[in-house]
Amino acid sequence: MSIVKGAATALVVCLLLLAVTAVLWYARLAGANPHHPIFFYLLPIAVVAFLFGALPAFACALAATLCAAFFLYDPVYSFAVASPLELGEMAWFVVLALTGIKCTVELFRPQGRLPAAKSRYGRV
């Protein structure tokens, strides 16, 4: 059963990345080249962190960085990024994505039971 759950998680992550990459790639081809396109991947990464946890979200952040480098930055269809500014943008994206993943996982962690209150002075 865990193999099926892992495969479903991977499928959802790939479909989210594919959808965002397709929209951004189409916008680039249409001439409406958005500034800093890699940051559009933050919302799907937060959704993956909320639904599936930290590990799939980390994989999603890594895959989003690779997709952006390959499809959205010049030279297109290459992992080489021409501008140092865009390399810095990608580095800050990774930092922001990892911080967002950690915050999302901590905010939506199920709360455990609080221990029973004890008397401060040893009396019942």
Image: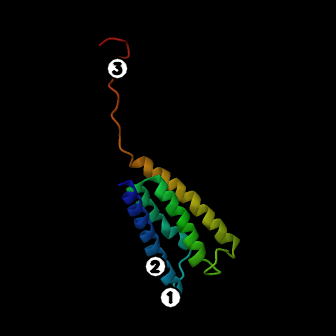
Q: Quadrant of the C terminus?
A: top left
Disc nearer the start of the sequence (1/3)? 1
Disc nearer the start of the sequence (2/1)? 2
Q: Which of marks 3 and 2 is in front?
A: 2
Q: Residue furthest left?
A: 124
Residue 96 % position (x, y): 55, 58
Query: Which residue position holds label 2?
Result: 23
The 10 Å Cα crowd at callout 2, few under 14, some 14 to 19, many 20 or more, is few
Which element carries disc 3, helix, strand or loop? loop
Identity, as a three-letter code, of the amino acid under mark 2: Val
Identity, as a three-letter code, of the amino acid under mark 3: Lys
Q: Distance between the residues labelled 2 and 1?
A: 10 Å
Query: Which residue position holds label 1?
Result: 30
Query: Which residue position holds label 3?
Result: 118
Residue 119 in sight here: yes
Residue nearest the observer in this picture, 21 or 88: 21
Residue at 43% x, 56% y is 49
**Above or below — where is 57 with respect to 76?**
above
Relative horizontal placement of residue 81, taking residue 10 as reference (left or right): right
Disc nearer the start of the sequence (3/2)? 2
The 10 Å Cα crowd at callout 3, few under 14, some 14 to 19, many 20 or more, is few
Which element carries disc 2, helix, strand or loop? helix
Q: Distance between the residues labelled 1 and 3?
A: 66 Å
**Above or below — where is 115 with respect to 75?**
above
Color encoding of the figure: rainbow
Relative horizontal placement of residue 78, taking residue 29 as reference (left or right): right
